[in-house]
Amino acid sequence: MKNQALFYRLGFALAGLRTTWRSEHSFKTHVVAAAAVVLVLLWLKPAPLWWALAALTIGSVLAAELFNTAVEGLADHLHPEQHAAIKAVKDCAAGAVLIASIAALGVAAAFIYELVQR
């Protein structure tokens, strides 16, 4: 489906978000955490740099979750039986989510540290 109009491509992306929302508990957890971060930022009104860091961090975690869901879904569809190579691929995708989440915690720790220093 190459060269579709922007409207259709946006529809495909939104369908992917809906599918992930419906099927992945961890995605829902990350979305709720992202909403909490936004509420805290609205309340504390930090410098724009913190908003940018939060946006990049939230985007990275959610994107990693979406890629993980896509990889797992494709792998399970193509090879439904357990296989060592498929397990390794799925584990790597899950590891990417873990790394993004740890990085998000690092940003949160830096933000809290700055708050305490005020």
Image: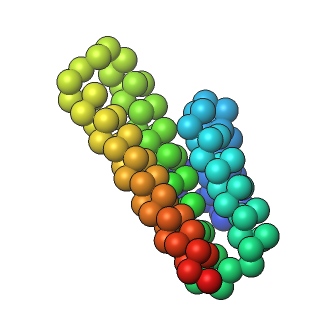
Is 25 situated above or below 48? above
Q: Quadrant of residue 68?
A: top left
Closer to the camera, 9 or 46? Answer: 46
Res 40 seen here: yes
Residue at image position (31%, 35%) is 91
Is 41 situated above or below 71? below
How is the model colour-coded? rainbow
Closer to the camera, 92 or 6? Answer: 92
Q: Please, which residue is most extreme toward the top here?
A: 81
Residue at image position (42%, 54%) is 102
Residue 118 is left or right of residue 80, and the answer is right
Q: Position of residue 40 (x, y in %)?
A: 72, 64
Res 3 seen here: no
Q: Position of residue 65 (x, y in %)?
A: 50, 46
Q: Quadrant of the C terminus?
A: bottom right
Is 6 situated above or below 85? below
Q: Position of residue 113 (x, y in %)?
A: 52, 72
